[in-house]
Image (cartoon, rainbow, N blue to C red):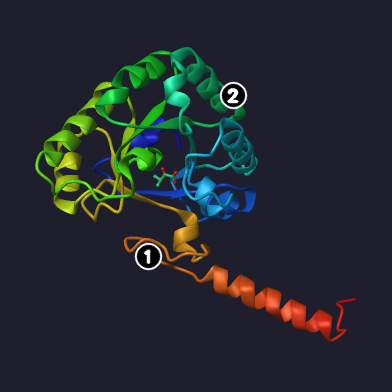
Amino acid sequence: MTTKSLRALKGERPIVALTAYDFPTAVHADEAGVDLLLVGDSVGTTVLGHPNTIPVTVEDMRHHAAAVLRALPEALVVVDLPFGEASFGRDRVLEVCRDFLRLGAGAVKLEGGREQEELRGFLVEAGIPVIGHIGLLPQQVAVEGGYHRRGSRPGEEDALLADAASVERSGCFACIGELIDAGVAGRIREHLGIPFIGIGCGPDCDGQILVCHDILGMGPDDPPGFAKVYAELGTQVRRAFEAYRDEVRSGRFPS
Ligand code: KIV
């Protein structure tokens, strides 16, 4: 899958996107036919045990992106630009993005709406395929004081439509929207010529992206209400470890 073929899916069929942070997950997701694998900075909470995505570094992203890319997926692999990078100046951001592309990534993701238009445009001009991310921005949790749904408060719909238009104007091949009211998400999708991929935005999007640990029931915490849980791997893993513990304690070592 390329950024061009992914973009061409708008109006054809819904785009299937999922996060992945390691080699086996990338193999399974790719064999299942997922279109886009995001090495998201959600690796910070799902895998690295941080309370939010803020501590995630470029080195963390590089390490996990390399593992996903070793699966040689057919899916488009997108790597998140972690917190704070965008503020270091465009030349440093460009160098980080180039590094991700040299590793084999197909594109990078950059959180932010109109305030990041210039940076996105600069990166696209420099040959970096970029996917935008609007609505709830997890990297802003420290200033926002939490994670809030967007779209119903006065002025929010107009602001979100303007952010989405800005993402398209800066040359992005797609836009992710997070935790936006379903009606507003539907209007964003109508206004955009590029795919609008939602997470917690209802069904009226060009595709859906979810966090793999949420849909696999892997997390120590309950997944967000919008994430359907397709397997209870956390429980299964714990039961397997308990069975192993009991066998070893009773002296039954596998030969
Ligand atoms: O990091 C991530 O997993 C994301 C998704 C929630 C879109 O940004």
Q: Where does the image place residue 141, in percent across and percent down from the top left?
A: 37, 43
Identify which amino acid the numbered label 2 is placed on.
Arg
Q: CA distance from mark 1 to mark 2?
A: 34 Å
Q: Where does the image place residue 221, in percent across and percent down from the top left?
A: 47, 64
Quadrant of picture, ligand 1: top left
Residue 128 at least partly seen: no
In this rendering, position of residue 222 left or right of residue 174? right
Q: Quadrant of residue 170?
A: top left
Q: Which residue is mark 2?
A: 102
Residue 148 at least partly seen: yes
Q: Where does the image place residue 242, in percent across and percent down from the top left?
A: 69, 78
Q: Secondary structure at mark 1?
A: loop
Mark 1 vs 2: CB contact within 8 A: no
Q: Secondary structure at mark 2?
A: helix
Of mark 1 and mark 2, the one earlier in the sequence is 2
| Figure check: 220 above or below 185 | below
